[in-house]
Amino acid sequence: MSNRALAVAHGAVTIVNAIALGRGAAFGVDLWTKAEVKLTSEAGIVEVEILSDVEECPQLVKKTALGVMKRFGLEKSFGAQIRTQSNIPIARGLKSSSTAANATALATVAALGKHLDDLEVIKIGVQAAFDAQVTLTGAFDDACASYFGGVVITDNLNQKILKQMTLPQELAVLFYVPSQKAYTINADTTRLKTVKPLVEIAFEKAMQGEIWDALTLNGLAYSAASNQDMTIAIDALAAGATAAGLCGKGPAIAAITSSDAIDKVRVSLQKYEGEIILAYPNSKKATVI
């Protein structure tokens, strides 16, 4: 047993938000979160330092690490000191929770000198997200896209992967990220579920491989249901984006673009107050460093 480990997981982008259907889709991007876990002899005590946002609640990371320890019956043997670092803005719809849970779970398993298969690692993080009340659906789609990379389409209610696809690497993703946070647990699910018929169409398009039409339709539907500004995504499309729409429950917007349209799409997003982040599709699995 090494007693210490460092792991990295990558970010993801919503294709179809699972809130309305219980089924969803997402794809991986090369944003990242790293988690360093050091085991201690203080059984059941987990201390967390979120270096990239020190005011953020540490409950998800704590519950993920404890979930791994409980999986091996070691919660009464060890505690942990955990440090996370990320370039993913928190509570903007950019899968910061799924990515942090994946990295933490992987690092904790490695620090204990144990092994779990990939889906077990993911499911521990998903359960921790429920326990920490940072998710409404378990975000199994987001967690899988973060962990495996590529496109992942899932049944979140039954925690099953329905389909996986690769993505062309020449595409880029521009995120428009406003300053305000929006926590998933506070979303008005009754209102969001009113667009279920449109989201059903988006999901079927994703299953057929039409992921960019799915992403745009999903984003517009959920933007309307949550009273968020659709003109940002429309402006990105008018500037040449292949697809654009709300990421997660927002407020971030993801615009997928070919390399030759990046500058025009960036200019369209810069008209609005907020940060612009450039990322690229990711196909690498989460891993222990």
Image: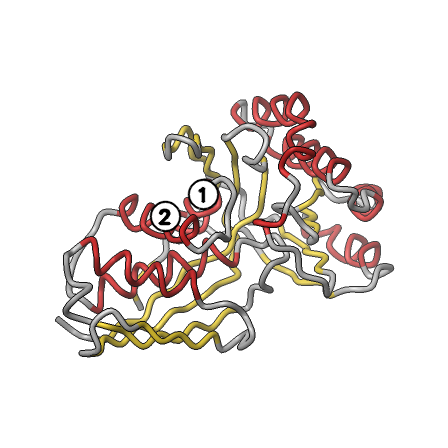
Name the residue: 15% across, 63% down.
Answer: 74
Towards the viewer: 209 or 226: 226
Residue 20, horizontal then vertical, whole percent: 59, 30
Towards the viewer: 181 or 152: 181
Could you tell me how many numbered marks the image carries?
Answer: 2
Q: Quadrant for the C terminus, please.
A: bottom left
Residue 18, horizontal then vertical, whole percent: 54, 35
Q: Residues within 10 Å of mark 2 (few under 14, many from 20)?
A: many
Determine whether, in the image, residue 249 is placed left or right of residue 52.
right
* Element under disc 2: helix
Instruction: Point out the residue furthest to the right here.
Output: 271
Name the residue: 72% across, 33% down.
Answer: 221
Q: How is the image coloured?
A: secondary structure
* Element under disc 1: loop
Determine whether, in the image, residue 254 is placed left or right of residue 119.
right
Q: Residues within 10 Å of mark 1 (few under 14, many from 20)?
A: many
Residue 102, horizontal then vertical, whole percent: 38, 56
Name the residue: 57% across, 49% down.
Answer: 185
Residue 271, horizontal then vertical, whole percent: 87, 59
Q: Mark 2 belongs to which amino acid?
A: Gln
Towards the viewer: 242 or 63: 63
- Residue bearing the label numbered 1: 138
Mark 1 touching mark 2, by CB under 8 A?
yes
Q: Mark 1 belongs to which amino acid?
A: Gly
Towards the viewer: 182 or 264: 182
Residue 180's label in the rendered image is none
Q: Quadrant for the N terminus, please.
A: bottom left
- Residue bearing the label numbered 2: 127
Answer with mark 1 or mark 2, whichever residue precedes in sequence: 2
Q: CA distance from mark 1 to mark 2?
A: 7 Å
Q: Is residue 111 above or below residue 122?
A: below
